[in-house]
Image: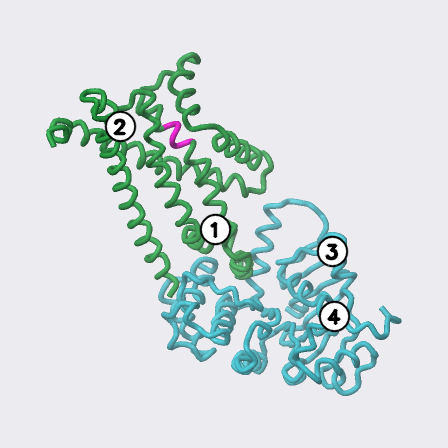
Amino acid sequence: MTKPPIELTGIRKAFGALEVLRGVDLSVERGEVVVLMGPSGSGKTTLVRCMNLLEEPDSGHVRICDCAFSCGTRSDRRGRARLMQRARQQTGMVFQQFNLFPHMTALGNVIEGPRQVRNLPMAEAVALGERLLDRVGLVDKRDVHPSRLSGGQKQRVAIARALAMEPEVVLFDEPTSALDPELHAEVLEVIQELAGDGMTMVIVTHETHFAREVADRIVFMDGGVVVEEATAEAFFTRPSKERVRTFLRLVDHSGALVDAPAPRVGEEAV
Amino acid sequence: MDMLADSFPMLLRGLGITLLLGVVSFVLGSGLGALVALARISAFRVLRGAAIMFVSVFRGTPLLIQIMIIYFGLPQLGVQLEPVPSAILALSLFAAAYLSENFRGGILGVDKGQWEAASSIGMPYWRTFRRIIFPQAIRIATPAVGGRFIALMKDTSLASVVTVVELTRVAESIGNANFRYMEAFLMIGALYWLINTLLSVGQGMLERRLGKAYA
């Protein structure tokens, strides 16, 4: 397969009157790490959620590995649901709020997909689960419920859960935003290791240092469109758009400012 | 004391009938209530509408009227039910209306992120419901459902108006026999209280057990 595992064309999405995505084209190559950045409300979370169709675009085309969707057409509900499930099995997702299953142990969380969706035999699923928990450094927590884990540990279990489906792509929606600052590093390290192993990833994050180290490409969004796309190096050292420069100044001075409203300096180019 | 000794067999029988009415109606009502809750959150408008209507009717009318319609009214349509089945039918329908709302609250009380996490690993809708949502919804709904069980136990006393000889009816006949109404009703009241205290204790134990599954 040489086609990019994720290909979005002409993606539009509105919530009521609010247009969140206003025509986005983006494809992610195999083995590539794409970081989505941009101010709050720029549409980056919605975009990453379109990549496994947790959010269905109003129009545009989404291709996830071998599953292609034309959005905005109401046809064949059941076939569509099945196709969606297949697409989602090929993409893992890591959420800002972890969304671990609270009634299951760490291991139970990780093997739920392999058992229930991939139909692996118990022994095989457990072996896989232990291997993945080991990979995120939590094999000793296998029988612990999420309520007994720190935020950083929860997020690492959630990463193991996503990997357990052996996905083609892993999507991260602000994986450290709900964590205390001192817990960011343990999660980012795991993601960095995955990048080192050649995993295809799309990461929404405000962590500039991390983005610079891990990203092959940075996609900067504002107002529901892609404003700038560049290699990490180019993005941080010589951003071409004033809007990007303003954003970087804000996030560099203080991480707390990143959730401030979008800097509305250069309204010129959209 | 004489009064108690004489009426003891009758009391025991009444207690049995009261427990039968309460427990059977609760079980049937839970089953039906679960179906109504699912219909209420389903994607199909007709099902949703039917569920809303059902809840509205059976919560919006007095249980006493429902019992009387089933026992005294249905025979006019050629459906003749014995007193106990009539009471169980009415109590089950009435309980189902309330329980469906408790269940629905439990299901909606589960964080939306749980649905998203399950679908992000490609889990189909029903399996997600069974494996992920249902176990958490039960825990959320337990206090309300337990309260509904206790209320239902007390509501069984209305079955006395359709000649079911349950505790309340027994109290009446004991009182009628010797005009010691105060003692008779106090005694029966204490029995209801005892049943419901035991139910509360059981509910507390269940809640602790369900809580343990998370730690």
Q: Which residue is mark 1?
A: B129
Q: Which residue is mark 4?
A: A261
Q: Which disc, if any, is residue A14?
A: 3
Name the secondary structure under disc 2. Answer: loop
Q: Residues within 10 Å of mark 3 (few under 14, many from 20)?
A: some
Gap between marks 2 and 3 measured at Cα:
60 Å
Residue most toward the right?
A268
Q: Is residue A242 left or right of residue B194?
A: right
Gap between marks 3 and 1 measured at Cα:
28 Å
Name the secondary structure under disc 3. Answer: strand
Give the colour chain A carries in the figure. cyan
Name the secondary structure under disc 1. Answer: helix
Magenta stretch, residue numbers: B89-93
Q: How is the image coloured?
A: by chain
Total count of labels: 4
Q: Chain of mark 2?
A: B
Q: Amino acid at mark 3?
A: Ala
Nearest the viewer among A15 and A181 is A181
Which residue occupies 65% across, 75% down?
A205
Q: Is residue A210 left or right of residue B121?
A: right
Q: Which residue is mark 2?
A: B166
Q: Give the green chain's letter.
A: B
Q: Position of residue A12 (x, y in %)?
A: 75, 58
Which residue occupies 65% across, 72% down?
A204
Gap between marks 1 and 2 measured at Cα:
39 Å
